[in-house]
Image: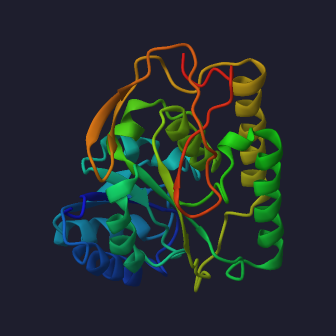
């Protein structure tokens, strides 16, 4: 099966120190995929020279373009527009601090022959400073506690590769890193198969990390609480009735339409690194 095409989104906030080397490496890694690709560079309100660097790079790189948000939206919200504008078969993201090596992308894309998406989780937390490790473990623990076992993954804030038609068919709601969890849960609601894959994550080499800021953590926790209350207390649907996506497997490609008020399945999500079968909690109203 040929390697699928890929849209890579890269949010950028004041990263002029790291940008030149990151962009050169990322261009080489995308060319190594062996299929069509596009690179969407998202200026998330930078006040340094990042926007100029991105614009010069895009002028010299076919397939690259700049999306200027003008003001800062923050992680989660800053990729909404890029998801809507993605044009390739699959879509994923990277960050300029290189939290994972984009050279991993060809290998990850090659695994999409038997699943609809990839969630690549950290094999260890050594790339994080001690406080971030604690925050990561607490985040996973809280979500395992609040959400049903059927929606349990090894991790939630992961490198995710999703079908572009899936992301563009659903409504993106979260304005924080909870967007990663939202995408996994809505994929489960539509009975898409997500494969969990371990990969090493890398430490930041230069610049200042903002992922552990109190403001961002607070925003994330508010989204966790809000969507738990919405989906499992008020029993609001995750996905609108009639949402149609194409599923991908080694044997066929089929269209899945979710017309009913609720769905149920079999199996559990996550935990082995294999394709995650889906079980939606009975009566949870995942689709309506």
- Give residue 130's position: percent from left, percent from top: 82, 77
Taking the image as shown, residue 163 lies to the left or right of residue 188, namely: left
Is residue 42 visible in the rendered image? The answer is: no
- Left or right, 2 with respect to 197, comes to left
> How far from the left and from the top, in percent, is residue 247?
34, 41
Tell me the residue at 27%/81% (across/down).
28
Confirm whether residue 154 shows in the render.
Answer: yes
Identify the coloring: rainbow
Q: What's the residue at 19%, 72% (across, down)?
A: 34
Q: Quadrant of residue 280?
A: top right
Left or right of 96? Residue 34 is left
Instruction: Identify which residue, 200 or 192, lies in the foreground.
Output: 192
> How far from the left and from the top, in percent, is residue 228?
74, 32
Residue 241 lies, with reference to residue 275, above or below; the image says: above
**Vertical comparison of 185 with 72: above or below:** above
- Percent x, y of residue 266: 59, 37
Give the residue displayed 82% in from the left and 54% down from the top: 141
The foreground one among 64 and 178 is: 178
Q: Quadrant of the C terminus?
A: top right
């Amino acid at each position: 099966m040929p390697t699928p095409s890929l849209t890579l989104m890269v949010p950028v906030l004041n990263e002029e120190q790291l940008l030149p080397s990151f962009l050169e490496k990322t261009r080489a890694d995308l060319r190594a995929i062996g299929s069509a690709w596009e690179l969407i560079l998202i200026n998330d309100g930078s006040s340094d020279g990042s926007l100029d660097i991105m614009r010069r790079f895009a002028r010299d790189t076919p397939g690259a373009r700049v999306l200027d948000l003008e003001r800062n939206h923050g992680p989660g919200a800053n990729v909404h527009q890029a998801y809507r504008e993605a044009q390739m078969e699959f879509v994923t993201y990277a960050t300029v601090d290189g939290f994972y090596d984009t050279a991993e992308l060809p290998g990850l894309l090659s695994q999409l022959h038997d699943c609809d998406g990839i969630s690549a989780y950290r094999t260890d937390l050594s790339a994080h400073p001690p406080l971030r490790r604690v925050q990561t473990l607490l985040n996973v623990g809280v979500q395992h506690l609040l959400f049903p076992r059927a929606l349990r993954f090894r991790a939630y804030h992961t490198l995710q590769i999703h079908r572009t038609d899936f992301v563009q068919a659903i409504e993106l709601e979260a304005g924080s890193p909870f967007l990663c969890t939202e995408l996994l849960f809505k994929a489960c609601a539509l009975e898409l198969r997500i494969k969990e894959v371990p990969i090493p994550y890398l430490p930041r080499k230069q610049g200042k990390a903002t992922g552990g800021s109190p403001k961002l953590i607070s925003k994330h926790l508010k989204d966790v609480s809000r969507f738990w209350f919405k989906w499992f207390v008020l029993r609001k649907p995750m996905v609108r009735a009639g949402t149609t996506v194409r599923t991908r497997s080694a044997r066929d490609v089929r269209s899945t339409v979710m017309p009913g008020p609720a769905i149920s399945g079999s199996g559990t999500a996550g935990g082995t690194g294999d394709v995650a079968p889906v079980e939606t909690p009975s009566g949870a109203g995942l689709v309506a």
